[in-house]
Image (cartoon, grey):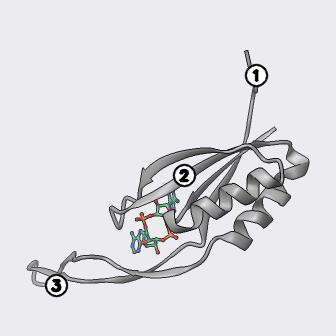
Amino acid sequence: MKLVIAIVHDEDVSKLIERLNKEDFRVTKLASTGGFLKAGNTTLLIGVDEAKVDGVLEVIESMCNTRREVTPSSTLIGEAGGYLSMPLEVTVGGATVFVIDVEKYMKV
Ligand code: 2BA
C-alpha cells in the first residue's frame, strides 16, 4: 500500500476529487497553506495499492494546471543590507506530489 500526498491548487480540487472518486480512488481533503505564498492550497491524501499508483498520478497530472501567481510583496535583502519590497511572479503547480510507503493500513 502507498500513500499519495498531493498539494494542489484550490481551483483544481473539486474536479480532481470528482474524477478520482469516479475512478474508485478514496480521497481525504485537507486545507493547507503554502509556506512561500502564504496562500491557501489543498492537500489530498490518497491511499492506494501499489499497482494503482500510476493511475492516480495520471489523473492528477491531467486535472491540475500550472499557473503564474504574483506575491503581494516580497521582502528582499539588498547588497547594502537594506530592505526592498516588491512583487514577485512564480509558477505554481500543476501539483506537488509525494508517494510514500504505508507500513500498516487498517479500518476498525
Ligand atoms: P508555496 O510554498 O506557497 O509556493 C508557491 C510557489 O512559489 C511554488 O510553486 C514555487 O514556484 C514558488 N516558491 C516556493 N518556494 C520558493 C522559494 N524559496 N523561492 C522562490 N520561489 C519559491 P510549487 O513548487 O508548485 O509549490 C506549490 C505549493 O506546494 C507550495 O506553496 C507548497 O505548499 C507545496 N510544496 C511545494 N514543494 C514542497 C515541498 N518540497 N515540501 C512541502 N510542500 C511543498
Nearest the viewer among 25 and 99 is 25
Closer to viewer: mark 3 or mark 2: 2
- Which residue corresponds to the image point at 31% horizontal and 83% vertical from the top-left? 88
Disc 2 from disc 1: Cα separation:
22 Å
Amino acid type, label 3: Glu
Tally of numbered discs = 3
- Element on which disc 3 rests: loop
Q: Residues within 10 Å of mark 1 (few under 14, many from 20)?
A: few
10 in relation to 87, above or below = above
Residue at 87%, 51% in the rendered image: 52
Location of residue 89 in the rendering, given as x and y in whole percent from the top left corner: 37, 84
Q: Position of residue 1 (x, y in %)?
A: 82, 38
- Earlier-in-chain disc, 2 versus 1: 2
- Disc 1 designates what residue? 106
Distance CA(mark 1)–CA(mark 3): 55 Å
Residue 79, disc: 3
Q: Which residue is mark 2?
A: 43
